[in-house]
Image: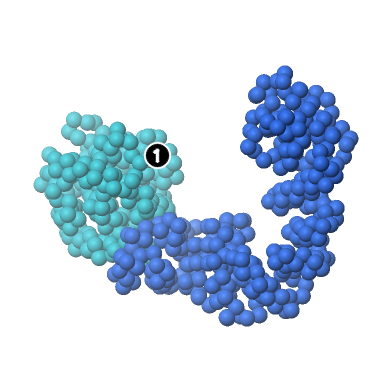
Chain colours: A cyan, B blue
Amino acid sequence: MTPEEIADSLRRSVEIESGKPLVVFKDPAVSGHGSVRVATPDTAMHVLRYPPSADVQLPYLTAFHCGMLLRSLRAESPQRFDLVSTAAMRTETQQLIQAHLKTSGADVPESLIPNLCSQLGDGLGIQLRSMPIAIRVDHWLWQQYPSLQELQRTNVSRQLQESMQTLGPSVRALVPLRMLNANLAMNCAFAMFWGELWGEPELAVPYTLAGFEAAGRQLLEMVRSIDSHPNGDRHLVEQWASHLNLTAWYRTVTKQ
Amino acid sequence: MSQEYSFSLPYSAFDLDLIGLTAADVGSSEFTEKVSEFLAGQFATFGGLARIVCNDQSHTIDVRWTRNANFREPRDFALELLRSGKIGEAIPLLWTVHQQQRRDVSVLFNLGVAWSEHGQPDKAIPILRQLLEIEPNHVHGLVALGVALIRVQQAPEGEFLLRRALRLEPRNLWALRNLGGCLLQLGRAAEALPVLQTALEIGPQDPQTLLGMGQSLEALNRSDDADDYYQRIIRLGMPEPVVELAKERRSAIAAHRMRSAGELRPDVLMYLTGAVERFAGMSLDQIQALGIEIAILGQTGLDINDPEPKYTLRSLPGTFSGLHLCCLMYAAFKKFAPAQDVGIDFSREWMQVHGGR
């Protein structure tokens, strides 16, 4: 199968299993690797938005997001879940960020701080919800669809490079240590996974230098040891949250 | 094509347990050395190429690597930076390579020269001494150390090393040129002259040698001969700092000639008086525009020894001699920027024209 045929096939699977179409939009307002809005009982379709710069990558992005959707659809209730943030996440991250900005010297206008707090708090939750499962989906795609591997590798390499930037001084100036540590531990697990799969262990070196090797290894071990069926995904995310000391900020809720 | 990866980690975020140091050691040379060693070990077997830089300016460990065979090795990349004049960027890279290959003569030489050229000869000196301990007859190393020592006012040892380099390689232009400069700095212009003449046989277009010749001749009261060398530099047109220096020296010689010619120059008095009269009908903005236009024109050289009116201006009709323009510029600057040094001294004539004001 060509990458386009793989993407079409997975898209059809999503549509059959969910009973709703998946619509794909090129959207200049979207960055990175695109985003999916999953259909709710009140909406008629799933929507995948991707940035214009990712045109070439579209078959992989479609396959990846379909893989994520399929895992969610194939999980049996009550294991089908959403991740929500708690009230403590809003207040505590805001306090942490404000205190951190005062000492770090980052030049952030006062008016932008609430927005920054939302971005960082929500971003960490999205990473926690998606990264452990993304590793499973990507592994599955890599094994099942060799003709997709080139696009997958290009995309993941870019993602790995982007993640490494969070080690640098400019991100450290903005993000409080507690949030940054959780982010870096997850990035480390992701880099270790690909490093091992591709035989490029040096991909994890940046995180080793920063002291995240053990944390990353433990997170990756959870991906491998916890039930690999989609029914295990909720527990996997909960275990990552617990290990990263994030349970007071995010919790899983059963999807209706 | 293999992806190239890079990251930058602040010193303060490095996991010190990996290298057995404490927070007090962060930023020390031992820290840099151990970080470099540790990273070299991490990348030793991966089969690609990595560049590791401990950057003491940003206090970050900067790493870039790829499995792509076309990646430039750290040393090659540093040399490329040096060749393109990016000395400040090359230094941290060379320093890190030096931590990994401490007895590598080429790295020691390039790091030493880079520091010396980057205004840090005190850092260059121990590095170049290390080089000479390993290879005592490294001619370029001898010259580089000699130059660095001259830069920290240790000219006698500098002279000794440059002469040693010349015994090994008598026609080394770099050594000859710098020995000439060294002797000049030590007030031995007569000795400098034959050295620089030999240098000029080897590199007749070498601007630094031409400058050294001019300065030596000036020191020997042969200003007319010196002026010829300065003119040659200006004709070459580069490098800019040397050309600027040559222009300055030419102006100084011309000013000296005028001063020597008599107490007050009537032609200067005439031009300054004319300028003051002309300015009476002009606004300060107009005077300023005129002064600046002449100053810009002067950057390409005004010949004040030639009485022929051959220059024209946009802001004033007519044709002018070089001296006339200099007087106009001098008077103009006295109006809008009296403290500014315009590079020529008409102060006594100006006092006369202005009645001591």
Q: Circle 1: is it few (<14), some (14-19), or many (20+) Cα within 10 Å?
A: some
The percent position of residue A182, horizontal first and vertical second, equals: 24, 54
Residue furthest left in the image: A78
In the image, B29 versus A241, the foreground residue is B29
The answer to whether residue A24 is seen in the rendering is no
Residue A90 in the image: state x and y as whole percent: 18, 40
Q: Which residue in the protein does label 1 denote?
A: A51
Kindly identify the residue that appears in the image at 74 percent across and 26 percent down: B276
- SS label for mark 1: loop
- Give the residue at x 63% y 33%: B337
The residue depicted at 47 percent of the width and 73 percent of the height is B100
Q: Residue furthest right?
A: B308
Query: Between residues B180 and B235, which one lies in front from this camera angle?
Result: B180
Residue B171 vs residue B21: left or right?
right
Question: Residue B149 appears in which quarter of the rendering?
Answer: bottom right
Residue occupying image coordinates x 67% and y 21%: B283
Please name the amino acid that badge 1 sits on: Pro
Given residues A156 and B212, the one toward you in this image is B212
Residue A256, can we see it?
yes
Give percent across and percent down for residue A141: 32, 54
Taking B6 as reference, is B186 above or below it?
Answer: below
